[in-house]
Amino acid sequence: MNDKKTRRQFLKNTGRAAAATTLISAAAPHVHAAEDNTIRCVLIGCGGRGTGAAGQALSVENGPHVIGLADVFEKKVNNTYGSLTKNNKHGSRVDIPEENKFVGFDAYKQAMDLLKPGDVVILGTPPAFRWVQFKYAIEKGLNVFMEKPVTVDGPTSARMLELNKKALDKNLKVGVGLMCRHCPARQELFDRIQNGEIGDLTMLRAYRMAGPTGSAAAPPNDGELSELMYQIKHFHGFLWLSGGAVSDFLIHNIDESCWMKNDWPVKAIALGGRHYRGDYVDQNFDTYSIEYTFADGTKLMVDGRTMPGCKTEFASFAHGTKGLAVISSASHWPSRSRIYTGHNMDKGKIAWAYPQPEGENPYQVEWNDLVRAIREDTPYNEVERGVMASAVTSMGRMAAHTGQEITLEKFMSNPHEFAPGIEDLTLDSPSPLQANADGKYSVPMPGLVKKREYL
């Protein structure tokens, strides 16, 4: 079988598996929670999303006890500790003595060393560190919840898929923070689309257009932090750390759209630009417009923008020969998924709408599902889907940054690894990305630098 046919089959197979949350070998050995029936948990990466994930873990009935924290910033560790301990709902399930708070680039190992096989680690650090920490979690026999995206470039995407084979062999339960897949409203919409209720799917559209978001617009380093620590603090602004605004902010809309299509796109063209940058020194564009193409020729159009004063839109749509499906309406939840006859959102032409209110937030549901899989020892591994969603998103980003048509095959085989040697970083290490004499960083130059996203 030739490489192209193999790739097409791989894409089709992963697309069909996208609606499911489990991919695992039935013959894998069992890994249970600790024998006393207590699931212990540590958090690696004490930012907002990591802290949120720990809170959701604690909110699961009969869920984990959080016993350790790790980050490269001591302030973040202390802030997360305060946030978790002041929440009365968590009660005695937060047990983090001072000696279980770890700071530094090896802190992830120290925290995971507190756990036994079958316990859970939350990986909430920037995705650059995902494969390094996932590798150690597998060695320790730990179940994992990892935030999205899970990769930012071709080499790490291939590496994560290879590492996951070992996780599957050990029957480890692994959740990935693409929580939209756990939304009951979207799940019902997926079934309705697959059953032909909007006819043949002809086009998808997705938007995340807002003002400045996260740390995507990074100001100059004032010298209080080393270059490495400054970039980690503003991780949304640097491609090696997060994949930038595209990977971190657009991935949910791209993923939910590909889910409804039940496939992954095979290529992308895109454009974007830097407009009102002022003194900001990050690597992001202000606008991105991506056209994805699936194997059957269907298009997914994605628009992203982080500029103040402009029209905002945060939604995804699927068009078919019989009508329009609203995948999500505004932000991630509630989705308010619905179907219209025709392509105008006319209230009089609603053919189906998921009942409101929608119930539990999918950020919580994904944790309920993961803990249930651990307790009941059922197959549960979302890594392949997480890698594919991350790679497809990065493919679109690369198309914008280079000005070239990028195929998924070309992206996956591109040798440009953004942060080689990241596993050896220390607090005193130089950053994988260096500023020039003016304190500015290399930015994408479409049409001039064509084979990689930045020099």
Image (tube, helix red, strand yellow):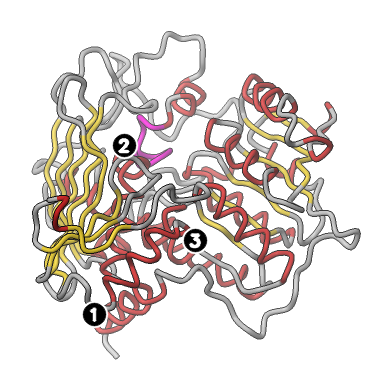
Position of 285 compared to 155: left or right?
left
Outermost residue on the bottom side: it is 1
Cα distance between the residues tagged 3 and 2: 21 Å
Location of residue 23 with respect to 445 vertically, above or below: below
Q: Is residue 239 magenta?
A: yes
Quadrant location, the C terminus = top left
From the viewer's side, name the closer residue of 16 and 182.
182
Position of 140 compared to 129: left or right?
right
Q: Amino acid at mark 2?
A: Ala
Q: Secondary structure at mark 2?
A: helix
Res 268 seen here: no
Position of 352 compared to 445: left or right?
right
Please provide the residue range marked out in magenta: 236-244
**Precedes in sequence: disc 3 or disc 1:** 1
Cα distance between the residues tagged 1 and 2: 30 Å
Percent of width and height locating residue 17? 41, 74
Percent of width and height locating residue 385? 43, 64
From the viewer's side, name the closer residue of 32 and 323.
323
Residue name at image x 22 percent, y 60 percent? 325
Q: Amino acid at mark 3?
A: Met
Magenta segment main secondary structure: helix
Residue 4 got which mark? 1
Neighbours of disc 1 within 10 Å: few (<14), some (14-19), many (20+) = few
From the viewer's side, name the closer residue of 151 and 307.
307
**Precedes in sequence: disc 1 or disc 2:** 1
Residue 160 got which mark? 3
Of the residues tagged 1 and 2, which is closer to the observer?
2
**Residue wearing tag 2:** 245
Percent of width and height locating residue 347? 17, 50
Neighbours of disc 2 within 10 Å: few (<14), some (14-19), many (20+) = many
